[in-house]
Image: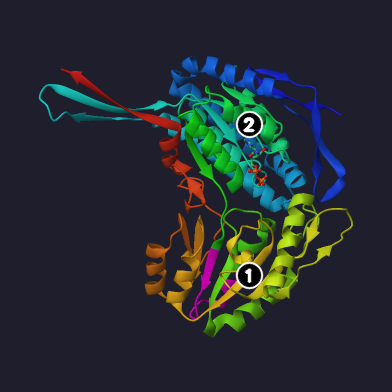
Amino acid sequence: MTIYQNLIAGEWVGSDATKNINPSNTNEVVGLYADGSTEDTKNAIAAAKAAFPAWSRSGIWERHVILKKAGDEIMARKDELGALLAREEGKTLPEAIGETIRASQIFEFFAGEALRLAGEVVPSVRPNIGVEITRDPLGVIGIITPWNFPIAIPAWKIAPALCYGNTVVFKPAELVPGCSWAIVDILHRAGLPKGVLNLVMGKGSVVGQAMLDSPDVTGITFTGSTGTGRRVAAASIEHNRKFQLEMGGKNPMVVLDDADLTVAVEAAANSGFFSTGQRCTASSRLIVTEGIHDKFVAALTEKLNTLVVDNAMKPGTHIGPVVDEKQLKTDTDYIEIGRKEGAKLAFGGELITRETPGFYLQPTLFTEATNQMRISREEIFGPVVSVIRVKDYDEALATANDTPFGLSAGIATTSLKHATHFKRNSEAGMVMVNLPTAGVDFHVPFGGRKGSSYGPREQGKYAAEFYTSVKTAYTLA
Ligand code: ADP
């Protein structure tokens, strides 16, 4: 089998490899991918450092052309890359193709942004002095990504990093190197000068840690667990390095008595269970007012009965497998915790077997949960959702905000008053009215508050806040 290698200083290198396994069919090896070392990571950082002066001064047309070419190729290969994504991560093929299209759109967006780089010229408060405000690239950006969006998250970090003139050392999650390798290959062939984008696949404790430990990495953008996020933060403060963290969520969806039941059920089923609940924007707390509670639970349970859990590649599958054995154990442990805490298991909770051996779990719904239970406070990251019954809107809002996280929050209501009040008073970075809490646009800011995020927002033009450093220059006229 071919070994997909790391890209360091413009060369494909590495002979140690790890198997990439399909969670829908654990007998299937998706590919062999290089397992990078500390030495590889150091070489990649040195290459990115050496490439920075020239790339930071490269013309915006060159950056535009390369990013556009990459976006075009990803779109042209959306079915093939979508299939690779579905095979390595386990989300359904339509979801995986959708994510691939989004990655292409992100490259197209930042190809455009490269042509729109601008600063400000303002008068000084002192006579005969001019002031220019510009944005400089940071330098070497370390990119560390998780497994749940194997092509979109790398795209939304790599595209702005390159657009604003930075060089990159990119470490994808161990479970999903395939899509990352593919987009690095595409960018490399699109004409990036050597060393501008380096790929080091391998373990977080080896490759990721070597990035955290290097004084030559000037910025780190990280998406992953809260625990690793804290390590990134501590190591970055040590080096006076800029960092950006996207971590967990325990996103609420409020359902009020006046909600359109169909809209509420569709939004809850989508947010809670699609992509196997493995989205940081998934809603895992459904906060439902008394008047609609029983009707809502009945309709949602009926909906869950219609959802097919099976091989991600099979037509008709709504929910693919859990990503791996470790995550499956986390999910089933939390199901046990929920039972012991006294929540009522209203649907699911069991492992299932399918034609191909994989990590299949029924969508699981708890009712009669309280917001203080562990299943309502801790991120599970699987298809496990609890329903919390509340008296009225005020209690719903207070419960929604009573969480250590603050990424996304939703409300299902036909009341303009409550929708408006919720948008203003939700303590989340993203608020959805009559929509799932997951599923966001690629051209507007993404990010949260409290334990969910740290640092500037990602995506859209707001991405510049992280990937550049503002400079104010004064000139005597
Ligand atoms: P998850 O539990 O979802 O896999 P992690 O936070 O462990 O979340 O992983 C997110 C990313 O962080 C992955 O690319 C992983 O390899 C990386 N990572 C894990 N440990 C470290 C570490 N000590 N230093 C840097 N990166 C790490």
Q: Which mark is residue 209?
A: 2
Q: Residue at x 45, y 47 (%)?
A: 445
Check disc 2 and report its element: helix, strand or loop. Answer: helix
Location of residue 272 with respect to 294 vertically, above or below: above
Q: Between 37 and 256, which is closer to the camera in this rendering?
A: 37
On the rendering, which quadrant does ligand 1 occupy? top right
Residue 296 in the image: state x and y as whole percent.
60, 78
Would you name the residue on which mark 1 appears?
Answer: 386
Measured as percent of width and height from the top left, residue 35 is found at 75, 29
Q: What's the magenta region?
A: 252-267
- Can you tell me whether the CB of the residue at mark 2 lies under 8 Å from the nearest atom of ligand 1? yes
Q: Is residue 321 visible?
A: no
- At x 71%, y 52%, the residue is 91
Residue 348 place in picture, x, y as percent: 75, 70
First in sequence: mark 1 vs mark 2? 2
Q: Quadrant of residue 223?
A: top right
310 left or right, relative to 410: right
